[in-house]
Image: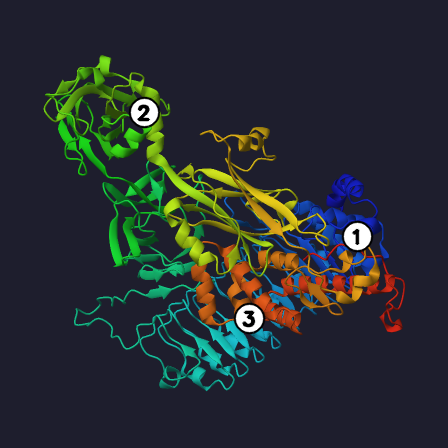
Amino acid sequence: MAAAEEELEPQVAAAEGVAGDATDTVDAHPGAPRLAGNRLSLDLYPGGCRRLLHLCAQQTPQLLEVEFLQLSGHEDPRLLEATLAQVPKSLPHLRSLVLKGGQHWDALGACLRGSLTTLPASLRGLARLVHLDLSFNSLETLPACIPHMCGLGALLLSHNHLSELPEALGALSALTFLSVTHNRLQTLPTALGALSTLQRLDLSENLLDTLPPEIGGLSSLEELNLASNRLQSLPASLAGLRSLRLLVLHSNLLASVPTGLARLPLLTRLDLRDNQLREVPPELLDAPFVRLQGNPLGETLPDSHSPPGTPVVLEMPRLFLTSDLDSFLVTPQGCSVTLACGVRLQFPAGATASSLTIRYRLWLPEPRLVPLGPHDSLLSGVLELQPHGVAFQQEVGLWLLFVPPRARRCREVVVRTLSDDSWSDLETHLEEETPKRLWAHCQVPHFSWFLVVSRPVSNACLVPPEGTMLWSSGHPGVKVTFPPGATEEPRQVRMQVVRMAGRELRALLEEPEAAVSPLLCLSQSGPSSFLRPVTVQLPLPPGVTGLSLDRSRLHLLYRAPPAATWDDITAQVALELTHLYARFQVTHFSWYWLWYTTKTCVGGLAKKAWERLRLHQVNLIALQRRRDPEQVLLQCLPRNKVDAALRRLLERYRGPEPSDTVEMFEGEKFFAAFERGIDVDADRPDCVQGRVCFVFYSHLKNVKEVYVTTSLDRQAQAVRGQVSFYRGAVPEEVPEEAEAARQRRGADALWMATLPIKLPVWPGRLRRFEGLGPGRGPSLSLAPLNLGDAETGFLTQSNLLNLAGRLGPDWPAVALHLGLSYQELQRIRHEFRDDLDGQIRHMLFSWAERQAGQPGAVGLLVQALEQSDRRDVAEEVRAVLELGRHKYQDGIRRTSLASKDLAPPGPSTAQSPEPAQA
C-alpha cells in the first residue's frame, strides 16, 4: 500500500492544480462537489479520488464532520485503493460509504461495471460505518475487511462477479439488510443463519440450486427474495421464519413447497410464479397473498407405463418475465419463455447440455446496429440475446413482434441476424394474432442480435457445375440461365427485383412515353466472375413490345457497388429482343435496369430515379406541452400520417404548423438544434450541446421529448427561439453552409426546416419577494414542477430529470410505492415500449404534476426510494433538499427578513446562488 501511495504522489500533486483550494472548489464553483453538512458526493464528478486526496492532504476541518461519502467505482484502481486507505484517519466519523460503478456506458449504451476488485484492509478501522454499497463493480470475492466491520447494518453487493460468500460473513452481528442480487452465487454459507438481526435479504438473479437449512435461523427476517435462481426444492426450516412478510421465489424450478409456509403468521405475499408446481398445499392454493401464475397446476405427469429405469420426462417449463428482469435460466429440460417486451422463445428439451443463464436487451435502432440494403425497411427494434456464439444442440424458436409494413406487393418480411461477423437473413414464417399484431418466427442455432426487416422478394439457388435456372417469384418474366460449365464449384446465387411506378418516372423525366423495366439485383458467393456467360432475361418496359420499339431509345444500365453511378452498357452487350423480353449475357453480377426514353444521357437520370425509389416524404413537427411549455416534443412523421398524429397530440400540445415536406432515406441521420437562446435543460446521451440526434426509420416512431431552458431573462418578456432540423450526424458546431442553406432550398441542402419555440414570461411563484428589487427576485424564482416548500427544500424540474436518469430498471418499484396503479404502469410501458428513459420520465413527471403544491410530496418520494432499495438516490435527494434549505435561509437573511430562530448557530460557509442539482 505504501508503494502504491508513493507512485500516486505525482498524481495527487497534479490533482492539486485541478482542484485548487479545497474551500473554493467545494463552495464557490457551482459545478464542483459540495460539502453539504455531513455529506460529500464525489461520484458524479471527474477526478473524485483526486479531489478527496487533496482535501485529505489539506486536512480540511470539514472532513471530520463527514458521515456520508460517495465515490465512483470507475476510478483508476490504484488511485482508488490509495484514496480509500486515507479514509479511516481522515473521515473517522464516516457512517455511509458508497463505491458504486454503473455510471458509465460503452459505445452501445450498455452499463459498465466499476473497476473495484477489493478493499484495503485499513477500512476495518471504520468503527462507525453502518452502510456500505459496492454495487456494479468487479468483485469476485468478498473483501477480507468487511467481516471485521462489526457495526455494519446494510451491505449492498449487487451486480458483481461473486461466486460464493465466506463463512466469516456470520460475524456481522448488526447486519439488517444484505443484497447480493445479479451475481454468480452457487451456494450459501451455513453461517448465514447466524445473522439474527437480518431483516431483508435479496439473493435474486444468481445460480443457487439449494439453500442451507441454517437459513431458518434468521429469526428477524422480514423480506426474502430468491427469484431467478435454480432452486428445485426448499428446506423445511423456512417455516421457522416467523417474522417473514415477503417471500419471492418466482422463476425457479420448484416442484414443491413446504407446507409450513402456509402457517407463517405475518406473511403478506408469497410469489411462486413460473415454477414447476403441479400441486401446492390447499392452504396456499386459496390464500389471496399467493401468486401461482405460470405453473402447471393440476396437470399430471406423462403416463409412466414404461419399462423400469426409463427416466420420466418433465413437461417443458413456461416462464413469463416481468420488465424488471433481464435474464432467465434454461436447463436441459427446455422451457418456453415470454419476455416483457413481447418476444417469445422456445428452448426444446436437450437444446443445452447444462443449465445456462440467458440475458436479453432491447436496443434502440441506430445505423451501426441496423444493416439495411438500399430498398430495405426496418420493422422492429434490435433484440440482443446473450451469451453470444453459444451453439445450441437443437435450434431455438424465436418469435419477434414487428410493425406491419405499408407496402407488401413483391416484398417479404425476414429476421436478420449477425453471424460470424456478417449479417444474414433467416428463414422466416409470419404468424398473425390480429391484423396489427404480427409475429416473425424463425429457428436460431445460436444467439446474437436480431431484428425484423422488410425487403424486396429474394430468390436464391445453388448453381452446380451442370448449370441451372433461377427465376423471380414476384416477377415471373425475370430469370437467369446458367449454362453447364459456368462454375467449377457450386455457388450460391441470389436475385432481388424492385418495381418503379410509371407515374414517378414520367414526373421525373417530364416525358409521357418514358418507361422502365423492373430493377434487377444479382449477387453471388465465391469468385466474382463466371467461367461462361450467363443469360439474363428482363421484361421490356410497360407499353413497349419487341415489334414496335425504337432501338435507339432502349438503354441497358448497369451499376456496380459501391459506386453510385449508373453506366449505359447497351453498346457493349448483344441485346436479343422478343415480343415481351430482352435477353443479354454477362460474366459477373450487379444491378441491371432497362430504360425506354428519348433522353440521351440516361445515367444521371437513373441515379435520381434510383434515389427516388428509396426516399420517403416526411414532415417535421415541434410542439410544446400546454401545461408545461418547457417540455418540447420533436417528431418526424410520414406525410400521410401527419393529420392523424396532430389530431391526437393537440389535446395536450400546442405549436406551429408542421414543416414543409422533405425527403429522407431509410436509416438517415438528422438532428434538431435549438437556437436563439433556447437550449436543452439536461444532459442526454443523444444530445450534444443542445442538438438532439435522430435516425429516421419509416415504420418506427421517430419522436423524442426534451426539456428546454434559456439563459435569457424571462421576467420581462417571453423568449422567442427556434428549433432547426439538419441532415447528418450531430456536429460539434452547426456548419456555416448548413446555416446558409436556409436561404435556398436545394436538393442537397443540409438544412431541412426551422420551427418556432416560445417560452412565455416566467410566472412569479414567490409573490412575497416581488418588492425586493432588481436581481433578487430571479434568484428566488422556482422552476416548474417544484416539489416541496421553501422551508423544507425544493426539488426542481432539473433535479427530477437527474433523478429520472438514476432510477433505471428500478422505476416500476418506485412507481408502485408512490401510489401509481398497475394499470397506469402498463399504460406507460405500452406508450414508451421502446424507450426506457421515456417510461421513467413520464412516470416521474406525471406523478409530480399531480403532487405540485401538496405538502409532504418530497417525503413521499424519499420514502418510496428507500422502500425500493434505492437508498443511494434517496440520500442524494436529501442532500439536494439540505442545500435548498441553506439557500433559502441565506436568501432570507440577505433580505433582512429572517427571524432570529432562522439564524444558524455558528458561522456558515457562503452558498452559491445557483439552484441545487441532484
Mark 1 or mark 3: name the one nearer the start of the chain.
Answer: 1
How far across and down, in percent of the image, does residue 105 sit?
56, 47
Q: Secondary structure at mark 1?
A: helix
Front position among marks 1 and 2? 2
What's the distance in space between the residues labelled 1 and 3, CA to CA?
Answer: 37 Å
| Residue that extends furthest to the top in the rendered view of this protein | 571
The residue indicated by pointer 3 is 201
Q: Quadrant of residue 323?
A: bottom left
Separation of marks 3 and 2 at Cα, in angstroms: 68 Å
**N-terminal label among 1 and 2:** 1
User: Label 1 crowding class (10 Å Cα cut-off): few <14, some 14-19, many 20+?
Assistant: many
N-term mark: 3 or 2: 3
Residue that numbered label 1 is attached to? 26
Q: Given contact means CB atoms under 8 Å apart, are the residues at marks 1 and 3 in contact?
A: no
Q: Nearer the viewer, residue 151 or 604?
A: 604
Mark linked to residue 606 = 2
Q: Amino acid at mark 3?
A: Leu
Real-space Cα separation, disc 1 to disc 2, in angstroms: 65 Å
